[in-house]
Amino acid sequence: MAITVSLVALFGLVLFFLLRSKSLGYGSAFVAMMFGFYLASTGASKPMNELTTAVVDALGNL
């Protein structure tokens, strides 16, 4: 049975819990979020998407 989870929702949930447990400050969360947006607009976005897809496929085959 394949379960598909949106990685955006997953990372958002992790970020929420890090902020709630005060393991991560609001400034750090903002910097991490902005880094993700800027990374998505560079040439590195295609290899990152391919890597994510490969990891999700590998986890699905376990």
Image (cartoon, helix red, strand yellow):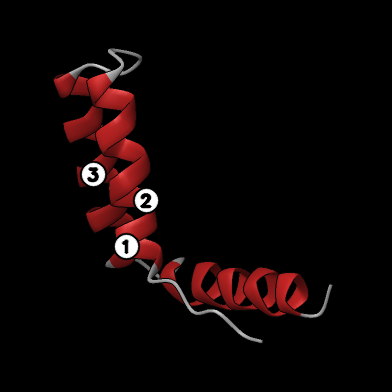
Tag 3: Cα neighbours inside 10 Å, few (<14), some, or many (≥20)? some
| Percent of width and height locating residue 1 | 66, 87
Q: Residue at x 17, y 33 (%)?
A: 30
| Percent of width and height locating residue 27 | 16, 21
Give the amino acid type for the residue marked by disc 2 in the picture: Phe
Q: Which mark is residue 33?
A: 3
Above or below residue 17? Residue 1 is: below
In front: label 3 or label 1 = 1
Tag 2: Cα neighbours inside 10 Å, few (<14), some, or many (≥20)? few
Q: Which mark is residue 16?
A: none
Q: Residue at x 28, y 49 (%)?
A: 12
Above or below residue 54? Residue 15 is: above
Please report contact status of discs 1 and 2: CB closer than 8 Å, yes or no. yes
Kind of element beneath mark 3: helix
Q: Residue at x 25, y 55 (%)?
A: 38
| Percent of width and height locating residue 59 | 73, 70
Instruction: Identify the image quadrant of residue 20.
Output: top left
Give the amino acid type for the residue marked by disc 1 in the picture: Val
From the image, tell me which residue sits under label 2.
Answer: 11
| Percent of width and height locating residue 43 | 41, 71
Instruction: Identify the image quadrant of residue 22.
Output: top left
Looking at the rendered structure, the number of numbered marks drawn on it comes to 3
55 vs 62, nearest the viewer: 62
Q: Looking at the image, tell me whether mark 3 or mark 2 is earlier in sequence order.
A: 2
Relative to 49, 11 lies left or right: left
Instruction: Identify the image quadrant of residue 26.
Output: top left
From the image, tell me which residue sits under label 1.
Answer: 8
56 vs 32, nearest the viewer: 56
39 vs 10, nearest the viewer: 10
